[in-house]
Amino acid sequence: MVKKNNTLKSQAKKDTPVDDISNEPVEIEATDSTVIESEENKTEKIKAVLNKVTVTIKLYASALLNKLKNISFSGSKDFFKNAGQFALDKLDDIKTYPYGDKFKELSTSIKKFKFKKTGFVKFIKKAGRKLSSSWKTILTVVPMFLIFYYAVGSQIVEDMDVTTEYDVPAEKSPLFETPDSMAFLLKREVDDKMWTPNLPIIFPAYVLDNMPNFQIGIIDAVKDVSNTMRKLSFNTPAQNKDIKDAHKLLSYAPNIWIMTRKSALNLAPSSNSQYRKAAKKLKDYRRNGIFTPTAADLERLVTGIGKELQKIAQANEEYQQENSGDFWDTSSDDLFYHNRGYAFALWQITKTLSADYKDLILDMNVYPEWTYFVSSLKRAAEMKPIIIRNGAPTSVFVPNHLIMQNYYLLRALTAAEKIRNGLIREEYVRQN
C-alpha cells in the first residue's frame, strides 16, 4: 500500500469533509503541490480497484456457498477449510478492505460447514473400511459364497428321475402313439426340467456332469429310433419329411447355448430350441398319416433298437477292460449315466410300441420275449447307486456298476434278437 505523509493527511482533512467519505474515489481540488495531487490520485485508484475485486469475490463466494449447502455428500471438507483459511490470511494483509469482517465471517462458515451424510453413504464407507482393513474377510467370504452357490444350486437343479413316465392311452388310437411318447421325452428334459449340457459357468448347474450325460443319453435314444422310423412302410411323403427334419434337429450338438463352441463370436441356435422344434416335428409326423401295424415294420424297429444296444454295450465293455480298477476314474460315471438315460428313453418307447403293436405281438407269439425286453430296459434305467465304481472284476470289496448295467443291457439285446427271430419265423411259416 502507498504510505501517506503527514502533509497529505492534513491537506485531506482540510479539503474533504468527514461526511463525504465514501467507497468511491474522491476528487481533490488541485493545490499548489503537484506531488500531493499525484499521490492522492494514485491512492484513490488503488482503492477503487480493490473495491471492485473484493465485491466480485464476495458474490462468487456467496453463490458457491449456497450451492454447497444443497449438496449431500461426505468428502472434500478439508479442501474448503483450507480455501477459507487461505482467503482469510490474504484478506488480513489488506487493511483497507471494507468487507474484511464479512469475508472473515464467510471463511469461518466454510470452515465449520458440514456436509450431509445419508445412511447409504455411511453404510458404504463402513463396509469399505471393513473389507479393506481385513484381507482375511475377502479370502473367506468369496470362497464360501462360491461353494454355496455351486454346491447347493447344482443339487437343487439336478433331477434324473425315472418315475415320470409317458401315460399310454387306455383306448387304442388310429394314430401312431410312439412318436408322441418321443416328443414327451424331449419336452420332459427341455421344458419341464433345465437343459444342463449347454449351461455356461454363470449357472450353478455348470458343475454337474451326471445329469447332462443322462439327458444326452435320452436325446441319443430318441434320435436313433427316429432314424429307424424313416424306413417304416406306412410313411406318407409328408411323414417322410417330418421324420427326416426331426432326426436332423435331434442330431444337433447338445452343448450349444447361444454361441458355437468353435468361436465365441458366432451366434447359433441353442440346443434346447432345436429339440423343441424336433418335438413339434414328431407330433406333425404322427398327425400326417394313418398308422398301419405290420410285422415287417415291428421287425425293423426292434432290429434298429438292437443294433444301438449292441453299440453301447460294446462301448461299455471296452471301457471296463481298459479302466477297471483304476484308482482315479472320472469317466465311468459319465458313461454309466449316459447309458442310464438311453435305457430310460428306450423303456418308454418300447412300452408305447407295446400298445401300438399289441395285437401283432400276441398274434406272432413273441409276447414273453417282449415283456422280457421291456423289463430289462426298465431295470437298467432304475439302477441308482450312490457312487459309481468301476472296480476290478475280481475285486471283493469294490463293485463294478458298469458290469451290472451291461448285464441288463445285454438282457434287452438278447430279448430283441429273440423277438426279431420270432417275427421272421412266424412270417415265414404263414407265407408257406
Image (cartoon, rainbow, N blue to C red):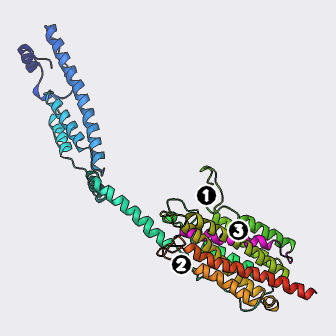
Sequence-wise first label, 1 or 2: 1
User: Which of 6/2 is in front?
Assistant: 2
418 falls in the magenta region: no
Locate residue 27, reporting x and y percent: 20, 19
Name the amino acid, label 3. Lys
Total numbered labels placed on residues in the image: 3
**Placement of 131 over or under 153, stated as above or below:** above
Locate residue 160, reporting x and y percent: 55, 75
* Residues at marks 3 and 1, CA–CA distance in whole angstroms: 16 Å
Disc 2 on helix, strand or loop?
Answer: loop
Report whether residue 184 is seen: no
Sequence-wise first label, 3 or 2: 3
**Placement of 307 over or under 15, stated as above or below:** below
Q: Could you tell me if the residues under marks 3 and 2 are in contact, i.e. CB atoms within 8 Å?
A: no
Q: Which quarter of the picture shows residue 6?
A: top left
The magenta span reads 210-235
Q: In the displayed structure, does residue 8 sit left or right of residue 211? A: left
Disc ID at residue 384: 2
Disc ID at residue 258: 1
220 falls in the magenta region: yes
Q: Which quarter of the picture shows residue 32?
A: top left
Name the amino acid, label 2. Lys
Residue at the (29%, 37%) spot, across then down: 60
Q: Residue furthest right?
A: 432
